[in-house]
Amino acid sequence: MKYMEARDAGGKLKRETLQSVAPWARSVIVCAINYNTAQPYSTQVSDPERGWISRYAWSRQDYHEAVMRRLRMVESKLRVVATEATIALETRCYVDTGPVVERVYAKYAGIGWIGKNTCILSQKLGSWLFLGVILTSLELEPDLPAPDRCGTCTRCIDACPTNAFLGPYRLDATRCISYLTIEKRGTIPGEMRHGMGRHVFGCDICQDVCPWNRKAPATTAQEFEPREGLVNPALEWLAQMSAEEFREKFRGSPVRRAKRSGIRRNAVSAMGNSGNRGFLSTLEELKKDEDPVVADHARWARETIGGSDA
Ligand code: SF4
Ligand code: SF4
């Protein structure tokens, strides 16, 4: 997540202001698309042989591409309008990777409020939203920010298994399962492993428990339907996945970010947290794995499941 700390020549955080990267920008258009699919929430499944991949990462097509394609359509319309009105126009589109904190702009654009779980929440759609922004040189009339509707609720904070919230609206990203399973390289600190439960890539708990997601509608965008086997995936399958199968299964998927080693490490940890003694013989084999990180986690997992033959 180093890009978040990128600074300009003067030492200012690039994400702090648009002035340094796009001094011509006068307005930010924020687009949101619902990626929720009609699948259970992580809090509704409990099969000890299976783990969890975050809802946003199941999709058939990488969300960066799916959202960018739509942003380009809006951008083209802007160009037509600007050309007809003989107005000079500059634009730039970002999905997740630019020096822009999308959810802050989403809040001021009226898409939703930033909840205590730090996600953007829409009263109508819940929080399963991908955001994309278009910077433009056009002076547009701003929308009104959406009011905060979290009220006295603290469900997300109370449900977090790794106590990653420092308080409402404040997250210690280094304690979040999303960071630990996706960004963290090498071994995961021992004290954090138990809290990760059976998560293999990301975590949805603080969104799953949110009352605003109880009736979140399913998306109509086919690209966000899950790839086969990724909803509540089999842990042994992931832990033993070959390099070739990983490449095939996760081609064009955000899951690639964790790399094969990370996914196997996370699956092995999840096996340890499952308490499922059926995994003992596989873990015994994985203790000798050529990847030392996987082998280390397999030793831990086997001890964690315990028993006389551990
Ligand atoms: S994503 Fe999971 S680990 Fe991260 S803050 Fe939410 S509940 Fe906690
Ligand atoms: S669970 Fe409650 S406090 Fe957390 S984001 Fe949802 S409404 Fe807000």
Image: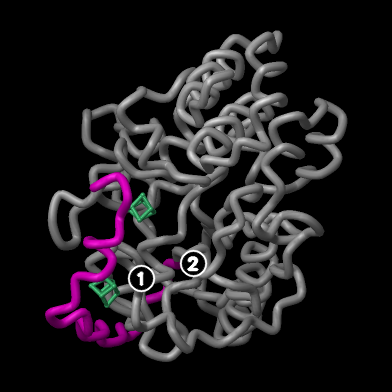
Quarter of the image containing the N terminus? top left
Residue 204 x/y as whole percent: 46, 60
Q: Give yes or no for residue 138 being in the magenta stretch.
A: yes
Query: Is disc 1 placed on a helix, strand or loop?
Result: strand
266 falls in the magenta region: no
Residue furthest front in the image? 308
Does residue 66 lie above or below 220 as drawn? above
Name which residue lies at 30% across and 45% down: 162
Question: CB atoms at circles 1 and 2 under 8 Å apart?
Answer: yes
Indicate the quadrant where residue 83 lies: bottom right
Q: Which residues are magenta?
A: 136-163
**Is 309 on the left-hand or right-hand side of 139?**
right
For the residue marked with disc 2, what is the amino acid? Leu
Q: Which residue type carries mark 1?
A: Ile
Image location (x, y in percent) of residue 91 = 52, 63
Estimate the x, y position of residue 48 in percent, counting from the top left: 59, 50
Q: Which residue is mark 1?
A: 120
Q: Secondary structure at mark 2?
A: strand
Number of marks: 2
Q: Disc 2 marks which residue?
A: 131
Q: Which sits in the foreground, 117 or 194?
A: 194
